[in-house]
């Protein structure tokens, strides 16, 4: 019986790790899409305030990405 309990716990550990990895992967994909959107918006010379509104990133976060060059807002 103890072996069974141990195997069940191991199974749940693996399942939990898989769920966490999946969620992390989804989050990374969302972040990549936001960065791609920021780049496209900047190419179209959109106002920074509009980009901040659309993506949820702050101006400082966009600047940290290194894709916002010296540009007047």
Image (cartoon, helix red, strand yellow):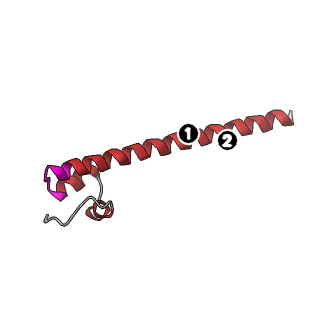
Residue occupying the point 18% across, 58% down: 49
Residue occupying the point 28% across, 63% down: 63
36 is higher (above) or lower (below) than 47? above
Left or right: residue 23 versus residue 11 is left
Q: Quadrant of the C terminus?
A: bottom left
N-terminal of the pair, mark 2 or mark 1, is 2
Work out whether residue 57 or residue 1 is closer to the camera in this orientation and state it.
Answer: 57
Name the residue beneath numbered marker 2.
13
Question: For mark 1, does the 10 Å Cα neighbourhood hold few (<14), some (14 to 19), or many (20 or more) residues?
Answer: few
Q: Residues in magenta?
A: 41-48
Q: Quadrant of residue 5?
A: top right
29 is higher (above) or lower (below) than 58? above
Measuring from the top left, give residue 50's x and y in whole percent. Answer: 18, 53
Q: Distance between the residues labelled 2 and 1?
A: 10 Å
Q: In the image as oriented, which residue stretches furthest toward the right?
A: 1
Residue occupying the point 26% across, 46% down: 37
Left or right: residue 73 versus residue 64 is left
- Asked which secondary structure carries label 2, the reply is helix
Name the residue beneath numbered marker 1.
19
Q: How many marks?
A: 2
Q: In which quarter of the image is residue 20?
A: top right
Question: Does the stretch in magenta take in 43?
Answer: yes
Q: Quadrant of the N terminus?
A: top right
Left or right: residue 31 versus residue 70 is right
Measuring from the top left, give residue 19's x and y in whole percent. Answer: 56, 39
Work out whether residue 38 or residue 14 is closer to the camera in this orientation and state it.
Answer: 38
Left or right: residue 5 versus residue 52 is right
């Amino acid at each position: 019986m103890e072996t069974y309990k141990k195997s069940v716990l191991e199974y749940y550990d693996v399942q939990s790790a898989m769920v966490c990895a999946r969620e992390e992967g989804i989050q990374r994909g969302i972040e990549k899409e936001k960065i791609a959107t920021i780049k496209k918006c900047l190419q179209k010379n959109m106002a920074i305030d509009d980009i901040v509104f659309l993506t949820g990133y702050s101006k400082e976060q966009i600047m940290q990405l290194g894709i916002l060059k010296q540009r007047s807002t």
